[in-house]
Amino acid sequence: MKKFLIQLAAISRFVGDTIRYVFKGPFEFRELTRQCYLIGYRSFFLIGFTSFIAGIVFTRQSRPSLASFGAESWLPSLVSQAVVRSLGPLITALICAGKLGSNIGAELGSMRVSEQIDAMEVSGTRPFSYLVVTRVIAATMMLPILVMYADTIALLGSYMMVNMINKSSFQLFVNEVAVSVTYLDIFSSLVKSAIFGFAIGIVGCYAGYNTSGGTTGVGRAANTAVVVSMVFIFVIDLVSLQFINLFRTT
Amino acid sequence: MNAIVEHSQTKKRVAADNGRESVVTIRDLEKSFGDRDILKKVNLDLFKGENLVIIGKSGTGKSVLIKCMVGLIKPDAGHINILGYDVPYLNEAELNELRLQVGFSFQGSALYDSMTVRENLEFPLKRNMKLFDRNKLNDLIIEALEDVGLAHAVDQFPSELSGGMKKRIGIARTLILKPKIMLYDEPTAGLDPITSREINELINSVREKYHTSSIIITHDLTCAKQTGDRLVALFNGQIQVEGSFKEMSQVDDPEIKAFFNY
């Protein structure tokens, strides 16, 4: 219990330091841009590919159930709400937790065990701003963009499936989607994605920055980053669902 | 330093400065990790312009000692005064101010492997000196690299360099800030005898050109002999003996004797 509380205090301090350095600086714009490129642009293919498949599979599996009630025309509406509200953010966040979480954890972990972070400290620079703050901000900024992209690609996959079966027009599909998805759906999805991004960034950086124990420690840091951020993603998803539902019912 | 000065917890430490100016003063330094005492009331002075070598077996706390000096590890008790700064009690800004005057060469070089040699050297300059002028940066980088004989490696990545080259670049990265004190952690570890000799010569030439005072942590006796004006032996968390290389090699203490006659 004591160990858990100490760990909790250390994580809270780490989060506090990250937020403090966001406002205090020094501001590492060049590194931030590089991280946005690595986290965002370099994830486009993987996110696009998986979202496209998810859109096809979800549409294909939902169609028989709706067809049995004669409600096949509701398919675009069902898919778009599921994708924008939950499927898009969740799939994107889980893929990013695996890809970015392990990347950040292993990179910072190996920098820690090879004394590169110590070298930054003893040269009078602030490695926290350069290494942690940039990655956390980049992950927080890029996740909503990736989610919007994932939603679009998943809906394209869904349309392809609908079109193959029903020969439905693209315009009709888009109209159905536009009617079904509300501004609250989009806004809440983007806010939730930013929180996912923050969680992935913080967990990856915390695990990597505090690595000890040589190469075994680096492996452990990467593993911790992935597992813990995935757990956080589901918890955040659950909490945000409850919170957003307050606005939906009123 | 004519006589060997012995230390222990029971024997009072004898001043050995001959009136020289001390740039590092360590008194009663203690550090433990869990129930393992690493440093036990360590006392040490580094005098201006000298190369002080700390020898000792692996795990005796040599690296912990110099990491305490730059604030990477917080000691449990004792005083560390470097260039007038009382290290354990400095705030972040003061610690960074001190760190600009103390160069630290890491055992594994600790080059930033995602950056080229040029970017490695630019890193502290841009952040500490706020120096962004391309020509000035280039002049300083080339000067530091020429001092270590590696100007041609400026655009290479650390993964493309040999162990000896990495050590040299690591030293160049600290020299670029013109430090007053240099701390070398196992500068010749893992290097062949010829490269080790080159590094030893480099350590001596750095002192000549930059007028630095240095602490060299090593268990390489050739390095100790070639670079050290004065040697201290750190065994079991305490400074046991100090003297010149010749004096140390004649000490009767069985542990030190074993170290010199391996």
Image (cartoon, grey):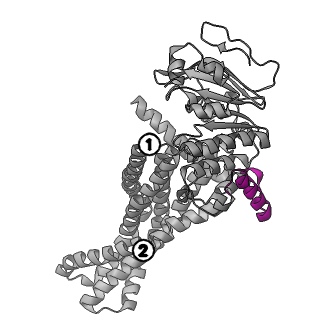
Q: Is residue A87 above or below residue B77?
A: below
Badge 2 density bin: few <14, some 14–19, many ≥20, Cα 10 Å: few
Residue range in magenta is B126-150
The residue at 79%/64% (across/down) is B135
The C terminus of chain A is located in which quarter?
Answer: bottom left
The dot on residue A214 is: 1
Question: What residue does disc 2 label?
Answer: A45
Q: Is residue B14 above or below residue B229?
A: above
Mark 1: secondary structure: helix
The amino acid type of the residue labelled 1 equals Gly
Mark 2: secondary structure: helix
Would you say residue A13 sits in the magenta stretch? no
Do the dots labelled 1 and 2 sit on one chain?
Answer: yes
Which callout, 1 or 2, points to the residue nearer the camera?
A: 1
Q: Is residue A220 above or below residue B7?
A: below
The dot on residue B113 is: none
Q: Where is residue A139 shown, x and y percent of the image?
A: 51, 60
The residue at 76%/64% (across/down) is B134
Badge 1 density bin: few <14, some 14–19, many ≥20, Cα 10 Å: some
